[in-house]
Image (cartoon, helix red, strand yellow):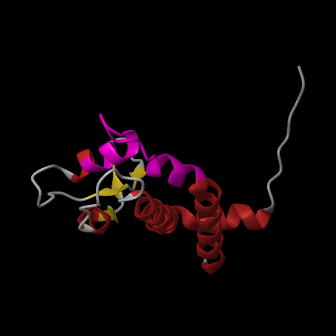
Amino acid sequence: MADVEIRMPTELLERLSKLGSRQDEISARVLEAGAEVLEAKMRSSLAAAVGKDTKYESRSTGELLGALGTSPVLVDRNGNSNIKVGFSEPHSGGVSNAKLASIIEYGKYGQQPKPFRKRARAAAKAPVRNAMMAKLEEELSKI
C-alpha cells in the first residue's frame, strides 16, 4: 500500500480558514461577477438575433431585451448557492417572455432558429470563469 501526503501552503490554509464565516457572502459576490458577464453576452447575442433575417418587417418593441436580467443569489435546500440569468415576466403581448425567447432560439414553422442563448453560453464560458476566479482572488486578498 502506498502512502500519500499532500502539503498545502500555510498561507492558503489560513486564508481558507478565515473564509469560514464569510463563505456565503463571498460566494454570492463571485456568482454575481460571473452572472454579470453572462448577462452582457446574452444581451448582445439577443440584440443581434431579434428582428434579423425575417420575411416581414420586425415588430420588436425591445420589451424582451428589457426583460433580460439576473436573479438574486438564492440558496437551495441542499445549501448550494444559485443565480440565474433569464427573463422576467409578464410580457405585454400576452405571451410569456420565456416562450418568445424559445421561439427565437429554436424557431417555429416559417421562422428559422436564431440560437442566441447557445452562442452566448459558448462565448461566455471562459470569460465567466475568469471573472469568477478574479473576484474570488480579490475577495481572498481582502481577508
Q: Residue at (52%, 66%) from the top-left corner? A: 37
Q: Nearer the viewer, residue 43 or 139?
A: 43
Please determine whether, in this image, residue 123 is positioned above or below residue 76: below
- Residue 96 location, x and y as percent? 18, 50
- Residue 41 location, x and y as percent? 50, 63
How many discs mark residues in the rendered view?
Answer: 0
First to last magenta residue range: 100-122
Does residue 68 appear to the left or right of 128 in the view shown? left
Please determine whether, in this image, residue 124 is positioned above or below residue 131: above
- Residue 125 location, x and y as percent? 60, 53
Residue 15 visible in the displayed image: yes
Q: Nearer the viewer, residue 41 or 14?
A: 41
Image quadrant containing the N terminus: top right
Find residue 51 and report its image quarter.
bottom left
Furthest residue in direction bottom, as rendered:
142
Residue 76 visible in the displayed image: no
